[in-house]
Amino acid sequence: MKKVMLALVMSSVMALADSTTVDATMKLMKQGMDDVQSGFLYNNKEALAKGISTLENANAIFSTVDVATFIPHNNKIQVTKNINKNLADDLKAFKKALKEQDFSAATANYGKVMNDCLSCHIIIRGW
């Protein structure tokens, strides 16, 4: 049932390519990060896997959004696209570390994912 609901949310979010998409996708990313953190804190591998999956799905949505709509005429557009790719790569490594039960590497990969998120926020929000 949860997979069906996630699929419905994902398909409805992908139908929009404006600030609504960004808001909805950021909520998905927050949920993914919450699940990952809970997974680490409570030694719950399923929560970790769920969080990574949610983050991967949300990041895939961002790869379809034209970031120029929120940072027009800005040389930072390519940087955000690079962050999107880095996040995909870091999530892949995170998933691999989790599968291999290498929790030290998983923790390091989580740090990279957090860094990707913050790097984008610094650019978009001007932190």
Image (cartoon, grey):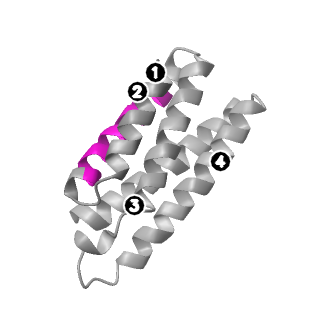
Give the residue at x 33% y 46%: 13
Whether residue 19 is situated above or below residue 104 in the rendered picture: below
Disc sitting over residue 125 in the figure: none
- SS at mark 2? helix
Give the residue at x 34% y 70%: 66
Figure quadrant of the C terminus: bottom left
Left/right placement of residue 1 relative to residue 44 reads: left
Q: Separation of disc 2 and disc 4 at Cα?
A: 23 Å
Segment tinted magenta in the rendering: 21-37
Q: Position of residue 115 (x, y in %)?
A: 46, 53
Residue that badge 4 annotates: 92
Amino acid type shown at disc 3: Ser
Whether residue 125 is situated above or below residue 11 in the rendered picture: below
Whether residue 89 is situated above or below residue 2 in the rendered picture: below
Disc sitting over residue 119 in the figure: 3
Query: Of label 3 and label 2, which has the lower sequence position?
Result: 2
